Image: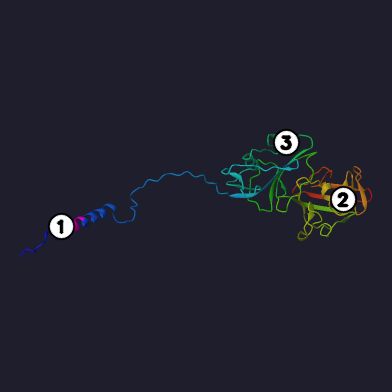
Amino acid sequence: MKPNVSHSTATAILVAVVVLLAGCSGLSEAGPSTPADDSVATESTPTTTTETPEPALSGRLLVVVEGEERHLSTSADSDFRFDDQDRHTWHATESMSLAAALETAGVNATDESLTIDGRTYDESDENTTITYRVAGTPIEDPREYRLEDLDPAHELVVRVDTDGQQSADRLLDQSHPHSHGQLDMTVAGEPVEFTQDRYVLASERFHFHGDEGGERWHAHSLSLTVADALSTFPGTNVSGDTMTYDGTTYRENGTSSSFVVTVDGDRVDPDTYVLKDGDQVAVTLDETDP
């Protein structure tokens, strides 16, 4: 016996089948979520990025020309560049000479000359001195010295000093690169002890630190002469060819002298010689000519 299906019921069944088939068709077109097939290559839009080279070496650099500090500029992607946060700190991606590093900043350096900001200074010029030092040690030729990773307390210093340059009027803060050196001073054959309170931090511009045993001086100025430095001591004044110390005036008289100043063993004029990082200064005072 055949089941009795009404026309309305048949129509409803037909509509349900059509809807079901449409739903299955949609699923087959979208497809279930499956892991990507690694064997199928996908295209991506290439992007261009500028990466800053990773630094291999770093240190600090101070450039002083005629008593004024010069801040150098380099491109961010060069092999030698300056830190974004500290303009004294440099980074190098590879070993290079000091001359090559300075050249990236538009400075041409040789053992006897320095060209910076379009001007060339030469040691053959009268009263012109060009010095390169690292941690107080002289660099004979910047083309031969290779950059090295430096302790933050040590700096590369490039200087050009001339007669009549800017005097010591700018005081550098403690964090600014500054010069250090040694000072030996004798009065009538007796050594002066720079551990005494009168010399420890007696002046912001030139002083000794109490925790260093008087072994080195600190000069917080870009253009400090020996006379400027010594005159910071209480009861001391250096002017012309005389030095007054503890109420006694000592006078320089050519080779027969009761007042002699040397730097690294060479006799200098304390009024014109500008202190440099690593200088070993010796002052001899005698009440009678030798």
* Residue with the mark numbered 2: 284
Front position among marks 1 and 2: 1
Amino acid of disc 3: Tyr
Q: Which sits in the foreground, 82 or 160?
A: 82
- Which labelled disc corresponds to residue 11? 1
> What crowding class fits label 2: few (fewer than 14 Cα within 10 Å), some (14-19), or many (20 or more)?
some
Please provide the residue range marked out in magenta.
13-18
Asked if 10 appears above or below 59 in the picture, the reply is below
Quadrant in which residue 214 is drawn: bottom right
Main SS, magenta residues = helix
Do the residues bearing badges 3 and 1 touch, measured as CB atoms within 8 Å?
no
Horizontal side, residue 244 vs residue 143: left or right: right
- Residue 80 lies left or right of residue 201; in this view the side is left
Residue found at x 12% / y 58%: 7
Considering depth in this image, is 145 or 25 the residue closer to the camera? 25
- Kindly report the distance in space between the C-alpha atoms of the residues bearing marks 2 and 3: 34 Å
Q: Residue at x 84, y 50 (%)?
A: 230
What amino acid does circle 1 point to?
A: Thr
Colour approach in the figure: rainbow
3D distance between C-alphas at marks 3 and 1: 105 Å
Residue at image coords 19%, 58%: 16
Q: Which residue is mark 3?
A: 121
The location of residue 139, given as percent across then percent down, is 70, 44
**Front-lying residue, 202 or 122:** 202
Give the label, 2 or 3, closer to the camera.
Answer: 3
Expressed as whole percent of the image width and height from the top left, the position of residue 241 reads 89, 44
Q: Tell me the quarter of the image containing the N terminus.
A: bottom left
Query: Whole-Å distance between the Cαs marked 1 and 2?
Result: 124 Å
